[in-house]
Image: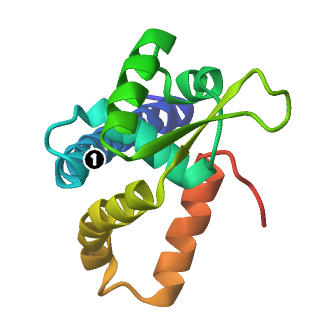
Amino acid sequence: MKDSEIKNESREKLEIELGEQLNALSSAAHALNVRAAAKFDSSLQPAAFHIVRWLYSYGPTNAATLAESTAMDRSSVSRLVKQLQSLGYVNREVSPNDGRGIVLSLTEFGQAKTIEALKEKESVYYERLSDWKDAELHIFIEMLRHFNGFNRR
């Protein structure tokens, strides 16, 4: 077996291991998101909490942007936003920019409930990192930033 074949086989094994770890991370993150969604409001679907988290992270927007950004169809976003609005989590206001569009945002109550739900999720991650040295955490952050395409150094 040639050196290049050994290197390719070794690289392939590493890529498979990486895939396994990314799958484990994705599965764990999904489970934590479902738990956080239930903590936010157990009467809602987790997809509603996805909308809430997006609004919390990025601020007010219109339904079209929200649908595109969350990879949901517009009808689902519309239905979920109506639920969130009826429960007092989301505001719908006329856009100050054009007067025709609708801007969606979290209410103060929605923001407070979001923070409460996210604290539990964050505590799981913080617990996993609690014995890491600052240098290890810095390297991990930089590697994730690079992996996610955010090469801001």
Image vertical order of residue 89 relative to residue 12, above or below: below
Residue at the image point whose x is 45% and y is 42% from the top? 90
Determine the residue positioned at 46% across, 61% down. 108
Q: Is residue 31 rendered to the left or right of residue 84?
A: left
Residue 150 is situated, as x and y percent measured from the top left of the image, at 70, 52
Secondary structure state at the residue bearing disc 1: helix
Q: Percent position (x, y) of residue 95?
A: 74, 34
In the rendered image of this protein, does residue 135 appear above or below residue 66? below
- Closer to the camera in the image, 55 or 7: 55
Quadrant containing the N terminus is top left
Residue 13 seen by the camera: no
For the rendered model, the colour scheme is rainbow
Residue under numbered circle 1: 33
Tell which of 25 and 107 is nearer to you: 107
In which quadrant of the rendered image does the C terminus lie?
A: bottom right
Percent x, y of residue 11: 47, 38
Residue sitting at 60 percent across and 46 percent down? 148
The residue located at (42%, 32%) in the rendering is 12
Q: Quadrant of residue 117?
A: bottom left
78 vs 25: above or below: above
Horizontal and vertical percent for residue 2? 51, 30
* For residue 98, above or below residue 91: above
Q: Nearer the viewer, residue 117 or 141?
A: 117
Residue count near mark 1 (Cα–Cα under 10 Å), binned few <14, some 14–19, many ≥20: many
Q: Amino acid at mark 1?
A: Asn
Left or right of 68? Residue 114 is left
